[in-house]
Image (spheres, rainbow, N blue to C red):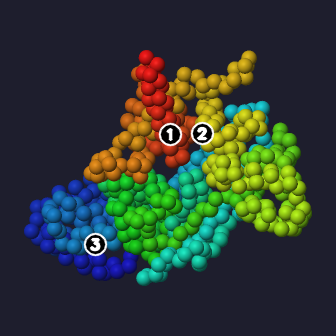
Amino acid sequence: MTGEADIVGRAIGLLKAFFRANRHLQSTVLDEAFEGFEKDPRGLLKPDAEPDTFVVDCVTRLLGFGCTDGHRHSLSRLLTVIREQYLGASPPPDYVELPRLLDVDCALPTRDEERAYLEALIEREEARAQLYSPLSASAQAAPESRVAPLLAPWEGHKDIALLLHRPRPAAGEQDQPGDAGTREYHDILAAFDHVPQAALLGAPGAGKSTTLRKLAVDMARRALKDPDAALPLLASLGFWSGDEDLEGFLAQQLPDIGFAAAALAQRRRLILLLDGLNEVPTARRAKKAKQIQVYRRRLPEKTPFIVSCREDDYVGELKLDLDSLSLEPLTPQRVRTVLHHWLPDAAEHMAPGSADRLFWQLAGDERLAGVLQTWLDAGATEEEFWTVSDPGEQKQAYGQTSGAEDVLWREHVPNPRSLLRLAANPFLLTMFYVTWLQNGGALPRNRGELFSGFIDSLLSREGLIHRDPDTDEVQRDERGEALLFGLGEVAALMQRVRDPSDHRGDDESGDADVLTVLPRTEVDAALDTGQKGAGAALLKIAEDASLLEGGAEIRFRHQLLQEHFRCRVHEGAVAGRRHRRLLVLAG
C-alpha cells in the first residue's frame, strides 16, 4: 500500500489519543465496527490489552487483514465508527482522510463482480436497443411483412451517424464562429478515441442516448476480454432528482459498480457516461451542473467522461467546460444509406427496390429518382441536388432537365413540410420505417400520424390492438384506449408538477420547467382507471411496450414521446373548449 508507514503512524496517533481516554470502550468499539460481518477480524485482536499495546496491535493486524464486508478496509471501518459515534461534528481531519486512503483498494470490484456487471449492462442495453429497432417493432405487429433479420440501426455502419468535434475555447477566448476548428467523425468509437472528454450534443431524437449506449456496450465487451480495460459506467441524469451529490447518485443508480467510481478512476479504469443533462429538474440544474464540473475536475486528468445534452439546452448554467461532439441531422444521402441497410434487395419477403421506393416516398414523389439521375448524368452532384435553392443554380443540370422535371423538383425538394426533413432525425426515421412496414408500404401524412402509428405498432406488439378480419380496420381494445388516455395524464402531470425546490412564480413557468420523471406511485395513480390494480397493470404494459421506463421513478422512454402525449392532452383540451363554446352558441 502506497505510504503505508505514514498511514500506520497517523492511525496509531489517532487511536492512542482516543483509547487512552476511553480504555473501557475497546471491546465496544470493535463490536460496533465488525459485529455481524462475514469478514470479521475481532478474533485476531486483544481488546483487554493496555491501550498503547492494543492500538499498535490493532493497527498492524487490521492492515494485514485488509478489506472487510461492503468494500471497506477494516481499519477504515474502525476509524469511521469512532468518528461517527464518539467524536461529534469536528473530528481531527485524519479521521476523514485516512479512511479515504485505506478504502481505495477495497473499493475496487472483484473480477467476478466486474464480469457480472458488464454482462448485465450488455444484456440490458442490447434489449433496450432492440425495443426500438425496426425489426423488433414490426415483426410481431405485421407478420405478413416480416423481413429477414436486420441489424439494429447504425450497427456496423460507420458512415451513417455524423459527429462534429468542436474544441472548447482556450481560457480567455470566445467561441469560434461557424465550423472553425471542427473535425468530422462517422463512428462514435473513433470520436471517443480522439475526444475522451466531451459534451455529446444533438436535437431531440438525434441519437444521443443510442450513441452512449452503443459506446457503453462496445467498451463493456472490451472489458470482458481484458481485465485491465476501463469499465463503462452509464447513468441517466433524468433520475438525479434528489439532494445527493453525483458520487452518491452513481452509487444509488448503479448499485453493482457505482460505489467503485472513484477507485476505478484512480486506477485509470473508469469511463463515465452521463446521459440527459437537460433532463435534470430545472430548479436544480445550476447546482447539479456545478457538481458535475467539480466531480470531473477531481478525477485524474484525461479520465474518459462524456455527458449528453440537448443542443438547444446546452447554454448558461448547463454549459460545461468540455469539448463538444455534435450529432448532425442525417442528410438525404445518409437516409437512403440507412434504408438500404435495413431493407437490402436480398431481404426475404420484401420486393427488390423497397429501400429506394420508401426513400422517394419520403422525398415526396418517386418520379424524383428520374430527376436526380438527369442531374447526375449532366455532371451535377447529389449534394447539389438536395442543397441548391433552385435548379437554375446548377447550370449543367438545368441545361438538361425538362420544365416538368424542374417543376417536380421545386414542388418537393425545398418543401418545408417534406417528410424527408423529418427523416433527418434518426428517431423519427425509425418511426417512419416501422409504420411503413406496419401499413403495407404507406406513409403517414404528418408528424402526428407518424407518432400515432408508431405507438400503435408498439401496442400491437403487446396484444392491445387487433385487426378486424371483416373490415381490415385496426382497433385498440379497452386496455389500449385506457393506456393512451393514462399516458396523456402522466405527461400532463409532468407538465403541472413543479420541483418543490423551485420557488419561482407561476409566471416564470414554461416548457423548460417540465419534469421528466415522476415517482412510480404517482404514475400508477395517473394510470388508474378505478379498477383494483389497474394502474399497476397499465404501468407494466407501458414498460413492456417500451413507452415508459424506470424503477422507483418513471419517465417516458424518449422525451419526444412525452411531448407527443402532452400535445395530445393539450389538443384534446382545446377541442373540448371549442365544442363547449359551440354548444353555448347553439343554445
**171 lies left or right of 476:** left
The reply to whether dot 2 and dot 1 touch (C-beta < 8 Å) is yes
At x 41% / y 52%, what residue is drawn?
512
Q: CA distance from mark 3 to mark 1?
A: 53 Å
From the image, tell me which residue sits under label 2: 448
Judged by depth in the image, the label closer to the viewer, 2 or 3, is 2
Q: Amino acid at mark 1?
A: Cys
Q: Which residue is mark 1?
A: 567
Residue 87 image offset from top left, x and y in percent: 15, 64
> What element does badge 3 sit on?
helix
Q: CA distance from mark 2 to mark 3?
A: 57 Å
Where, by quadrant of the figure, is residue 441 drawn?
top right
Q: N-terminal of the two: label 3 or label 1? A: 3
Q: Position of residue 71 (x, y in %)?
A: 38, 60
Q: Earlier in the sequence, mark 2 or mark 1?
A: 2
User: Mark 3, residues whose alpha carbon is within 10 Å: few (<14), some, or many (≥20)?
Assistant: few
Does dot 2 land on a helix, a strand or a loop? Answer: helix
Q: Is residue 281 left or right of residue 143?
A: left
Mark 2 and mark 3 lie on one chain; the one further toward the N terminus is 3
Mark 3 lies on residue: 97
Say which of 450 and 148 sits in front.
Answer: 450
Q: Residues within 10 Å of mark 1 (few under 14, many from 20)?
A: some
Residue 525 visible to the viewer = yes
